[in-house]
Each structure stands twice: as structure tokens, then as C-alpha cells.
Amino acid sequence: MERNITIDILRGFCMFCIVGIIHLSQYLGQEHYLFLIPFGNCIGWSCLGTFSLISGYLIGRKYCFHSFSDVGLFYKKRLVRFYPLFVLSAICLLCIGFNNSCQTVNALTGLSPFVQDKTCRPLTLWYISMIMIFYLISPLLLASRKWPRIAISVLLMALSVGMSLFIYVDKRFVFNLFLYLLGTCLALFDLSKLQKFTGWGGMTFALVSYVGMLSLLDVVHHSILRWSTIFFGVLCFVIVASFLSKKISATNKCVHFLSYVSMSAYLFHRFTYWACLKIFHPDDLTLLGLYLFLFALPVTLCFAYYVQKCYDKLVSSLLSNKSK
């Protein structure tokens, strides 16, 4: 599939927000952890929601199943794409004590969205664990076109909400499932007509509205405002990325780099931050922040790049040998 600069911008931006700002702030102390602040929490959720929307959209554009062999090939490709790196990340986080054995098992088996006990709910890896389930149900969607796919998406959404009434289902799972299903449905439509909403006017309106909603979170403590802000954040990110895609070259190396390392950076940033802080841990808060941002984050991005590059070469080599 041809590279999409808008999606590359979204991937790079959302990864940087989560890995380079929100999660990084946790190492400055819980009182500085942005995810515990309403606006930081909403931005973080919007970033992860954007990844779910992108994932659904790309899967919906690329695949259409006509036989069981197509389904098998899809599972094989998805498994090869992320699972070995996911396992390696899980082992690393287990070894450094970030996740315990129970959390690791639940992450690797995809059970984390249904685990109520917080001590057994994996940290960070919960998102990849959840995406596994989305891939598992994707053949139900991708075997159909347009209105049947939309109808199945509505049924799956209703089923997940209904399940949450009887068993524990992580609310993050329900929200991201909605965005993943929305992405697979949007893949069926020509979205080029929406470009007129991504000019200066549309972008300015989206940003001003989003900032206004974020500023209300400290005043109005209501779940409807919070969820509306999170969802609107996803839309805002898409509008801004679409606008920037007209200004940035499709071959921009920085955008391509951040997009390329996004998955590996998410999987391994906790490990690299831990390693960097083992090497040097400044006592001064300002110095610690500078050290993390100017040293640990670049190390993380470089490490993620070489891990992804080596893994891609390994997979390519194995597949080429198998085809001979």
C-alpha cells in the first residue's frame, strides 16, 4: 500500500506525545505525571484512540477476505508483524520489574481487557494486548462490503457494551473498539471530499474548540465532557494532520522516521528509560527532565529504529528463504 503522509504524521505525533511527553513525565515523580491531570489524561487517550482509528482504517483498506485461506494469511501477517517484538518487550518489562508475571501472561494472551484485578492488569502493554483482539475479530468485518460491514460493526459494538453489563470489560477496550470499527468503516468511503474541512479555517476551529474543551475539564467534572473531549481530540488530530500533509513533503525524513519507529518505541520505551536512569539519575528535577528529554528519549528512538530495522530484515530474510 502506498504511504500516506497524513497517517505518518498522526503516528509520529501520537507516539511522541505518549512516549516523549506523557509517559516520560512519570519519571519526574507522580506529582508531575501528566496522565494524572485531566487534560493530560484526555490527550493520552486521544492519542491511543487515534492509533486504533488508524489501525482499523489501514486494515479496512488493505484486506478483503474471500476464503478461509485469506483469513489464515491475514492472521499470519499480523502475528509476524508485531507478536515477536511484543513478546520481547513483555520479557524486558518483566525482567526490570515493571510488570509482574500475572500481568505479563494476561498481556501476551490478550486477556488484559477482561481482568478486573489491577495487580494483574498489564501496564503499557495493555494496548497491544487489546489490538490482538481487534485483529482476531477483523475477519468478521473484512469479509463484507459497505453496509454489511457497518451493520456488523454496530452489532459488535452493541455486543461489547452488552458484555460490560454482565462481566468486567475495560472501558478503554470499548472506546478503542469503537474507533477501530469506525476506521474499518471509513475505509470503505472516499474521504477526499472532506479535504475542504482541513484548511486554515477548519484547523483553527478544531484547535480552538479542543483547547476550550480541555480547559473546561478542571471546572466541569462530568464523564460526558471527558469522553466528548477525548473523541473530539481524535478528530482534531486527524484534521490537523490532514492540513499539515498539504504543507509537508511525502518524503519528509523526520515524519517517516517517527512513523516507522512508533510501534517499537511504544513497546520498548519503558525499558530504555529504565536503563538510562540506571546509568545516571540526576537528583535535581530540572536536570532530570532535561536528561530524560535530551538523552533518554533520543536513545529510545534510536534503539527503536534499530530494533525495528533488524526485525524487518530478519523477517524479510526468512520469508525470502522460504519462498526459494
Image: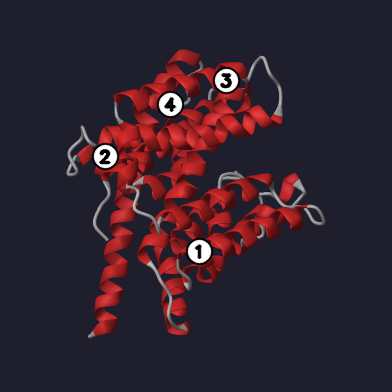
Callout 3 secondary element: helix
Q: Position of residue 196 (x, y in %)?
A: 30, 35
Colour mapping: secondary structure
Residue located beneath label 4 in the image: 206
The mark that comes first in sequence, 4 or 3, is: 3
Residue located beneath label 2 in the image: 255
Callout 1: 10 Å neighbours few (<14), some, many (20+)? Answer: few
Cα separation, mark 4 vs mark 2, equals: 22 Å
Which amino acid, by three-letter code, is at mark 4?
A: Ala
Q: Is residue 53 above or below residue 136?
A: above
Q: Residue at x 40, y 63 (%)?
A: 81
Callout 2 secondary element: helix
Left or right of residue 219, residue 153 in this image: left
Callout 1 secondary element: helix
Q: Is residue 196 above or below residue 175?
A: above
Which amino acid, by three-letter code, is at mark 2?
A: Val
Residue located beneath label 3 in the image: 32
